[in-house]
Amino acid sequence: MITGKSLFYSLTVLLVFHVFNVQGLVVPDLSKHSNSTSSKRVYSLGFSIRKLSSKKDNATANSPNSGLISGSSPEVAVTIQDKWAYITNLYVGSDQQEAEVEIDTGSSDLWIRSQSAGGSYNPSSSSTFKQTNNTFDAYYFDDSYAKGKWAYENVALAKDAPTVKGLQFGYATDVTTSNNIFGIGFKNLESTVYGGNGAVYNNFPAALKAQGLVNKNAYSLYLNSQEATEGTLIFGGVDKAKYDGPLVEFDLTGKANRNRDNYRMDITLDSVSSEGQTGTLNAPVTLDSGTTYTILNQDIYNAMSKIFKPQYSSKYQVDIISCDQPDKEVEFKFGDLVIKVPYSDFADQLYQNGQTKIDGVCVFALSSTNDEYILGDNFLRHAYVVYDLEDRKISMAQVKYTSESDIQEL
């Protein structure tokens, strides 16, 4: 869970949720459930998409997740609605209690808040809940956290879906965020490894494979368009209707932790270019659905600034650009693959008091850092991504927005 993202939550999001347990290679009819006992299965998890307002004070320039900003005068209160949240439900315990969670590819632990911490999950009504004496701690770069005890519980993606039995998760009794987190990254990014005793455990994607519920520890992510309200996460499968051209496979190039294994969803980004301006990177970047904006190096920021011409606003304390962007694209180059992102995805609307748009004023949704580079949601909306945790590879193609489906097993 230690990623370069910020977790801000302020709204409760209604669920749009479907799970399909399907046998074989192709799913011709997604409206039907299969009760097959075959170990070769695909689970298509729909999620709702909602833009949330941040609530953090004292933002600084070039901070992509900056939040509620205090301007130069006390009457200025500007909200950057900078958090795209991908929300679904899990069904927890012997009585299958609904637990609303945020999907996060950049972390690896599932944690659920207790009733004493404002949650709805009641372990006393579940015969399969087992709490340990081991401390659970998850910390985030915006200083938010979740603390409690590690526990074990049965978890399903739907009431009629097979159950992952005895899943280790964080039972959080002290939290400073609003959403439960459904981390589905590498086991080596689990908080037990990063800040605990170094031991790994089978998190949800790994447990699906270990218990024979999917054929491969892998999933694909379709965030859909900027205007969409629903997206899809497919465990063990890929939707061939949702991308153009072939999927291009990349080896991971991320950092290694104490277990000497890649733990971040990193591949090498060569360059970013548009209108004759090119910034080079040639370094690993993380594909992280938990980060809304894109964070790259100064060279890319400078090149793109020549196009977008951001201006620092002392009133709003952020770099701002015009919301009216031309119908042009920025190209992200990964070897022979190019993913195109429209200019409009680099302009994020500013709001007065969280509700009223400030006409024509948008935040520049690109920032620079000398640390960890991240391709956030404004990039991921335009790439169909397959995260292969088993073979430690990522495959990508240019996304295709469509309601059609052609789901195949990985």
Image (cartoon, rainbow, N blue to C red):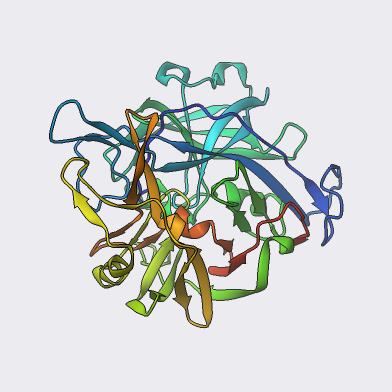
Q: Quadrant of residue 357?
A: top left
Q: Residue at x 48, y 67 (%)?
A: 328
Relative to 231, is 339 on the left or the right? left
Any part of residue 188 in sight: no
Task: List x then y, in percent, for residue 147.
Answer: 36, 32
Q: Nearer the viewer, residue 309 or 12?
A: 309
Residue extending farthest to the left is: 72
Q: Residue at x 62, y 30 (%)?
A: 92
Task: List x then y, in percent, for residue 15.
Answer: 62, 32
Task: List x then y, in percent, for residue 14.
Answer: 59, 28
Q: Nearer the viewer, residue 239 or 152?
A: 239
Task: List x then y, in percent, for residue 294.
Answer: 38, 58
Relative to 322, is 169 on the left or the right? right
Q: Quadrant of the C terminus?
A: bottom right
Labels in figure, total:
0
Q: Residue at x 44, y 48 (%)?
A: 290
Any part of residue 332 in sight: yes
Relative to 41, is 145 on the left or the right? left
Q: Where 233 falls versus 163 (above or below)?
A: below
Q: Where 236 falls versus 123 (above or below)?
A: below
Q: Quadrant of residue 264?
A: bottom left
